Amino acid sequence: MRGVVMHAPGDVRVEDRPDPRIEEPADAIIRVSATCVCGSDLWPYRGVQKVEGPTPMGHEYVGIVEEVGADVTSLTPGQFVVGSFWASDNTCEICRAGYQSACVHRVPMGMLGSQAQHLRVPLADGTLVATPEVPPADLIPSYLAASDVLGTGWFAAVAAQAGPGRTVAVVGDGAVGLLAVLAARQLGAERIIAMSRHESRQRLAREFGATDIVTERGDEGVARIKDLTGGLGAHSVVEAVGTQESMMQAIHATRAGGHVGFVGVTHDVAVPGMELFWSLAHLHGGPAPVRRFLPELMRLIGDGTINPGRVFDLDLPLDQAAEGYRAMDERRAVKTLLRP
Amino acid sequence: MRGVVMHAPGDVRVEDRPDPRIEEPADAIIRVSATCVCGSDLWPYRGVQKVEGPTPMGHEYVGIVEEVGADVTSLTPGQFVVGSFWASDNTCEICRAGYQSACVHRVPMGMLGSQAQHLRVPLADGTLVATPEVPPADLIPSYLAASDVLGTGWFAAVAAQAGPGRTVAVVGDGAVGLLAVLAARQLGAERIIAMSRHESRQRLAREFGATDIVTERGDEGVARIKDLTGGLGAHSVVEAVGTQESMMQAIHATRAGGHVGFVGVTHDVAVPGMELFWSLAHLHGGPAPVRRFLPELMRLIGDGTINPGRVFDLDLPLDQAAEGYRAMDERRAVKTLLRP
């Protein structure tokens, strides 16, 4: 089969890779209907994270079940399924508490490489959620968004306790930040402040439910949030970048007793203890337990309540993956969808 | 009046200080019945925090109202009152959300020096809580504990979401850590693990409700907590020390989705972003909003349900404050009560 392999920073190729096979009785094999490039794929692409030899890429996917292992009971070939970037059993104590991304048996899907024609999904019963029927083509991008960026933005908004009566600020205007805006709106937030200086992203933020746009960053951005909230700061702040500046911007923009939900992968970030202490903010985040939210998100997509697929502004055949990466790296695209 | 003044690290004296007077119409003057030395008073005593010239000391207090300003409506001279280490109006939006330690009008009581015969309390209506009648002498230490260490330990246990069905680990066996054990017990925690290597403190921890004692620290302490929790870590961890080691011990001992409540003053602590990210723990803490809990804590003390005054193991006249500091510095005493 054809699949994306990263050889070195900036060097992404589509090559022949071995077809995946059932390896464990809990596995399923899916034919990938759509996959995409994640903001976190740009860390190795930009050389921030090491590339240890040729690496199959991708951890977001929707597809059609082709084959299931002997222990799989809830899925049958032909079903359309969505899974998240962690395979999880969905039965252990951590999964039952809603933290499937820390399942005691978790498997990182990134190791298996979803940017390909076929994909092996371990712990298929726990990991995959099927739609009642195969959805129409125009809903595919939205279901694909649920696999990571929507689920991650949603988790961030939940971690930040976005809800009725709350003012929510979102730091980061990538796909996750934009979908955290959508999530905050769905969760009933009263006021949603998107922090963005890119006009096209501001437009999408407004479409997703942002009521205010702040273009300033760092201390100036914090000052603007305080201006907009009677000097107190936002109740809920989503951090969807993962740098020291964005994390401190999020903490400083939160009122005492408020909540920061952070999902940017915090490379080279260190949170100064005294600043966290005096902020009196709650801090929660990490790799999003997308599986917790999948059934609800898929219902909202299926009935047309939300349209998160709008974050894909570049739609390419899998063979043009290199251009998909390049466009995101150069910020010409928010997020690239790839069709195997 | 007589009052404690710190001149330099290790140099604590009891001197004549001016009697406090009503300065603002919201002030009250109290005659201090009992005060005490805080673990945080040891930071300047040990030279970790700078001493900028002679500094009146103390921020914990109970006493009898002597005089009230023109705007004070809820207090009358002769009442016995407890206040916390932040004066707060208890009416602003932040106070109403339960974060009185970040009240928009807050005044740090430490600036006023409660280790003295008399004390001015700003924002008296918001800050002070009166008992129905003047309590018997044997309850004074417990009411004094409510002023800071009990309220702080309680906040830490609440921030860590201690409650029914939960396993709670407490890092730190000072007065705050020990009272976090008591709080966890009152909040209904199923299992309470006190981390302590001092026999007398272990005894008090057991008396307050600890079900297990762990003597190991750092990585070994974390490994013991994991052993005791099926490899998952505790649901709730209280951090009541404030060092890098204790903070990381707390984060690492918490299961994914669990909660760290931290109240140790985090000097020279930096939380590595990636460790926090992968821990999937909730982190909340800071200067405890003791005022939120005072009415409930005073009720539990008044009816004999809890006896937090047990943490005072040294009881001295105010004039012997220097020995009180020394004994805590040398860890001969958990906490020193001073009687003006």
Image: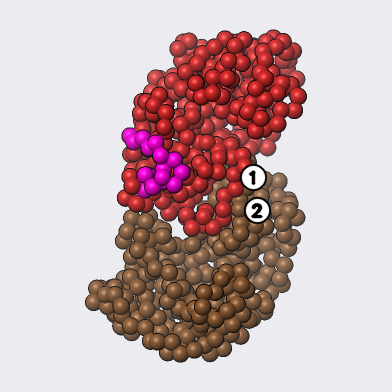
Chain colours: A brown, B red
In the rendering, which numbered label is found on residue A311? none
Q: Report the residue marked by disc 1.
A: A275
Q: Position of residue A71 (x, y in %)?
A: 24, 73
Three-letter amino acid code at disc 1? Glu
- Of residues A311 and B34, the one nearer the viewer is B34
- Secondary element type, mark 1: helix
Is residue A10 shown left or right of residue A147? right
**Could you say which is closer to the camera, residue B34 or residue B10?**
B10
The picture places residue A32, in percent across and down from the top left corner, at: 43, 83
Q: Which residues are magenta?
A: B211-226
Q: Going by the image, does A106 lie left or right of B80? A: left
Q: Is residue A165 magenta?
A: no
Q: Residue at x 74, y 13 (%)?
A: B18
How many numbered circles does the render carry? 2
**Quarter of the image holding residue B123?**
top right
Query: Dot 1 falls on which chain?
Result: A
User: Which amino acid, by three-letter code, is at mark 2?
Assistant: Met
Q: Which residue is the site of mark 2?
A: A248
Pick the residue in front: A13 or B152.
Answer: A13
Q: Same chain for marks 2 and 1?
A: yes
Q: Are marks 2 and 1 in contact (CB under 8 Å)?
A: yes
Give the class, few, some or many, for how many residues have Cα within 10 Å of label 1's Cα (few <14, many ≥20).
some
Where B100 sits versus A101, above or below? above
Q: Residue at x 57, y 9 (%)?
A: B317
Give yes or no for residue B212 being in the magenta stretch: yes
Q: What is the quadrant of residue B20 in the picture? A: top right
